[in-house]
Image: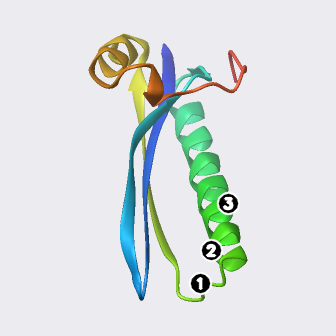
Amino acid sequence: MGFYYVVFSFCLSATGYESRCEPEKLIDTQYLGLVSCYTGAATVKKMTTDDAMQEARKMEVKDAKIDVKTRCITSAETETFLKQWGPAALVITGKKYE
């Protein structure tokens, strides 16, 4: 069993607005095991969707759609990911292990 991290990205679209997609981001929380990581990924997906829909309602966008994609990567893959995308791709939560 190893440590895993959640990577996520999302796209927003609505009628009359240009679609906007955000690049993948890595969350700094470590998960012990793949099952725990996928549970964390489901939470990230729900939180991202809820936050985006709340923002759309504030802007009075009624037909907003959000597509959130998540995946789990190993500790070894995180180094490659951050080298490729840089520090802006890291979301710092302060949680070390779940």
What residue is pinned by disc 3?
A: 51
Q: Is residue 35 above or below residue 18?
A: above
The answer to which of marks 2 and 1 sits earlier in the sequence is 2
Q: Helix, strand or loop at disc 3?
A: helix
Name the residue at 49% across, 22% down: 4
What residue is pinned by disc 2?
A: 56
User: Do tag 1 and tag 3 residues touch (Cβ < 8 Å)?
Assistant: no
Q: Is residue 97 above or below residue 47?
A: above
The answer to which of marks 1 and 3 sits earlier in the sequence is 3
The numbered disc on residue 36 is none
Of the two numbered discs 2 and 3 in the rendering, the one whose residue sits closer to the viewer: 2
User: Do tag 2 and tag 1 residues touch (Cβ < 8 Å)?
Assistant: yes
What residue is pinned by disc 1?
A: 61
Q: Is residue 41 left or right of residue 22?
A: right
Q: Could you say which is closer to the camera, residue 11 or residue 71? A: 11
Q: Could you say which is closer to the camera, residue 81 or residue 33? A: 81
Q: Amino acid at mark 2?
A: Ala
Task: Report how far apart the C-alphas of labels 2 and 3 lie in the structure.
Answer: 9 Å
Q: Amino acid at mark 1?
A: Val
Q: Helix, strand or loop at disc 1?
A: loop
Name the residue at 59% across, 20% down: 30
Within 10 Å of disc 2 (Cα), the crowding (few <14, some 14-19, many 20+) is some
Q: Is residue 47 above or below residue 82?
A: below
User: Do tag 2 and tag 3 residues touch (Cβ < 8 Å)?
Assistant: no
